[in-house]
Amino acid sequence: MVLEFHINKAPPPLREIETALEQAIKARALLRKKNIRFLIYILLVVAAYATFMLTVTIPMLADPTTLPDFVAMVAYCTPYATFLIFFVGNNLHNKIIEKPRKILDTAIPAFKKASDKKVAEINDCGQRYTEVAAYQQQVKKIGRSLVNGEAEMVLQWVERRMQKEFGLTNGFVI
């Protein structure tokens, strides 16, 4: 479930946030299981490769007169095959496991209650910007406190707004 926070839209109710948090936690548990399975598969491929090298290739290389073409092919292709196994394994691991894990690792804390320091910072912003104060009132009407995702959204909105007010559209320039 994708849950987005936007200052001009109504804040999501507590039940939606809890549901999104539960789904993210379940997805992270599934990723851990996938990670273990992936590790087993990669270890099996490396073990098969090593077994082939130890039982077939090395005994044939010991006597190069048996199949000189095979010996030459193995001598030239072994580093490339080794590199290919690790390159493909690493890319698959990044795509299947690491990228989703990083997304979930940032999503799970976003659904938890914001710290008092962030809430105080947002209260200060609410005194200057009516949009922030209105969003805070909507959250209070629902009967919950701000979550980290909302706090970050509000602080980013305030930063962009301040940059526009001061004419700094591309950030601070020194």
Image (cartoon, helix red, strand yellow):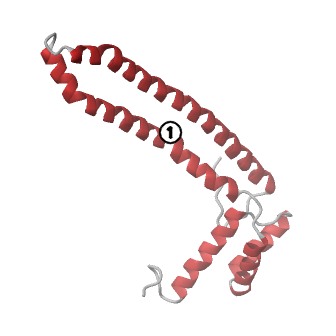
> Percent position (x, y) of residue 154?
66, 72
Left-right relation of 93 to 145: left
At 72% from the left and 73% from the top, the residue drawn is: 118
Left-right relation of 144 to 21: right
One can see residue 5 in this view = yes
Most extreme residue toward the right, as rendered? 143
Left-right relation of 32 to 11: left
At 69% from the left and 87% from the top, the residue drawn is: 128
- Looking at the rendered structure, the secondary structure element under dot 1 is helix
Q: Is residue 87 above or below residue 71?
A: below
Q: Is residue 39 above or below residue 108?
A: above
Left-right relation of 172 to 18: left
> Percent position (x, y) of residue 113?
77, 62
At 78% from the left and 57% from the top, the residue drawn is: 13
| Quadrant in the picture for residue 30 | top right
Q: Is residue 63 above or below residue 125?
A: above
At 53% from the left and 40% from the top, the residue drawn is: 97
Disc 1 target residue: 96
**Number of marks present in the image shown:** 1
Q: Residues within 10 Å of mark 1 (few under 14, many from 20)?
A: some
One can see residue 8 in this view = no
| Quadrant in the picture for residue 25 | top right
Q: Is residue 157 above or below residue 95?
A: below
> Percent position (x, y) of residue 95?
47, 42
The residue nearer to you, when weighing 129 against 121, is 121
| Amino acid type of the residue tagged 1 in the rendering | Ile
> Percent position (x, y) of residue 93?
47, 39
